Amino acid sequence: SFLVGIDAGTSQFGRCLWYMQDLTTDEVIWSYENDPGTRELQRNIWNASNPVILGMFSRTMAEVALANEYLRQTTPEKLSGRGVTDAATLSAVADYRNEVRVLRAFAYYNLMDLFGKAPFVTEADPINTAGPEYNRQQLFTFIETELNAVLPDLKAPRTNEYGRLDQAVARMILAKIYLNAEVYIGTPKYDDCVTQCNAIIAGGYTLNPNYLNNFKTDNQTSPEMIFTLQADGQVTQAYGPTTVMINGEVGSIEQNGVSLGVGSGGWGGALRLRKQFVQKFDGSDFDTDTRKTIISGTRDIEIADVANRDQGYVLAKYSNRSSAGVAGPSSTFVDTDFPLFRLADAYLMYAECAVRGASNATTSQAVTYVNALRERANNGSTVANVSAGDLTLDFILDERARELHWEAHRRQDLIRFGKYTGGSYNWAWKGNGSNGIAISNNLKVFPIPAQSLASNPNLTQNTGY
């Protein structure tokens, strides 16, 4: 890690994002609670000294700093002064500058969502400026304004080279801030979310006929992917989310690492499923659902002892094998890209907005989108299709878990549906109770790390920490 004093494992962007969005929820639990920061996150008892929270805040602000510096160094004046006059190069740099502005907005989106505030710095500020504190309303306004300003100049969906962003990525970020606007700024913006979803869906993406091919080493070829975090077992070796998940999926009893394309024992049963997530797939509707990769075997569904790796079911969603079954070149560092944004999420966002009363969404179209996912999950069969009467908010929340689990959405979803804090919905080890207990509302945002407060006197701690 180039971040001084922060471990490379606890400051990897995707890994920190996944820990904070999924490990803090009903979807998953980590066996090795001596790993710094994990015990407090998954038991919802974190504080401002948590190293994973520091890693996420620092890494994301570093992204802002890198973006700002690129924008400082690539102005027309700087390029001209350095003798850069080639038309193709200047055109490429103009594209890069637009994309960098989106990446900076994406960084601030994550800070807004996770922390509710952030120091605000742009390329107009000198290097090492201690930026003023922006609250959620200020960050929301910046993200919205910046993305709308740059959107017309971004490449059209699916026309950029893989790994770079395009208009659909900017629209996904906009859709997310509008979907969660009631949480962020107290004002619902579901119509605006639908507008963005419609544009994304019209962008030429299609569902991958095979759900699980979205989570294999060649998932860069999936027509459903909008934006990913790239992983390569040889070129970009890092303890990122897919390396953690695939090695962690290997069961302590099953020793199924070879089938997942990693070492036979993987990480020895590092990850297991909390009961409440498993129960989302209860019922005959899910007998043939390919999204149900849950392995139960002789296991107990209850996790009475977090350290007992034989308790709790395990998952096999992600794989270090290609759609043709070929294992990645490394048995530790995987080749599978992490899906930050994919088309299925746009379908479900549209459906949720329809249920929430968006004036520009129809229930019939929402049913069509949900059933497209259901039919894909059942190999084209309509056996599990739903009707308009099935579309309730509780259904949407559960369907998002079934479709998007382990993709770093769950915490945000539970907060939006009013199920994260309080005690209306409890899960195993929520609030440090084996069966789950209510947690306080301040936990809807994470604390500003103590080191970050110390380094910037403009920052204030979030209420309750």
Image (tube, rainbow, N blue to C red):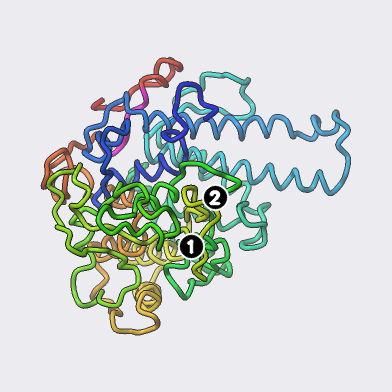
Residue 430 point in image, percent of width and height = 18, 43
Q: Name the image quarter holding the C terminus.
A: top left
Name which residue lies at 50% across and 22% down.
4
Distance of mark 1 from mark 2, alpha carbons? 12 Å
Residue 447 within the magenta-colored segment of the rendering? yes
Q: Which residue is mark 2?
A: 233
Looking at the image, which is closer to me, 295 or 72? 295
Name which residue lies at 39% across and 50% down.
247
Which of the two discs, 1 and 2, labels the residue nearer the N terminus? 2
- Relative to 458, is 95 above or below? below
Residue 203 point in image, percent of width and height = 58, 67
Number of marks present in the image shown: 2
- Relative to 297, is 425 above or below? above
- Callout 1 environment at 10 Å: few (<14), some (14 to 19), or many (20+)? many
Looking at the image, which is closer to me, 162 or 456? 162
Q: Bounds of the magenta span? A: 443-449
Please tell me whether mark 1 sits on a helix, a strand or a loop. Answer: loop
* Left-right relation of 236 to 293: right
Residue 244 point in image, percent of width and height = 40, 47
- Relative to 115, is 106 above or below? below
Q: Which residue is mark 1?
A: 321
- Callout 2 environment at 10 Å: few (<14), some (14 to 19), or many (20+)? some
Q: Residue 27's mark?
A: none
Where is residue 114, by image quadrant? top left
Please tell me whether mark 2 sits on a helix, a strand or a loop. Answer: loop
Looking at the image, which is closer to me, 140 or 41? 41
Q: As shown in the figure, which amino acid type bears the numbered disc 1?
A: Arg
Q: As shown in the figure, which amino acid type bears the numbered disc 2?
A: Gly
Residue 392 within the magenta-colored segment of the rendering? no
Q: Main secondary structure of the magenta part?
A: loop
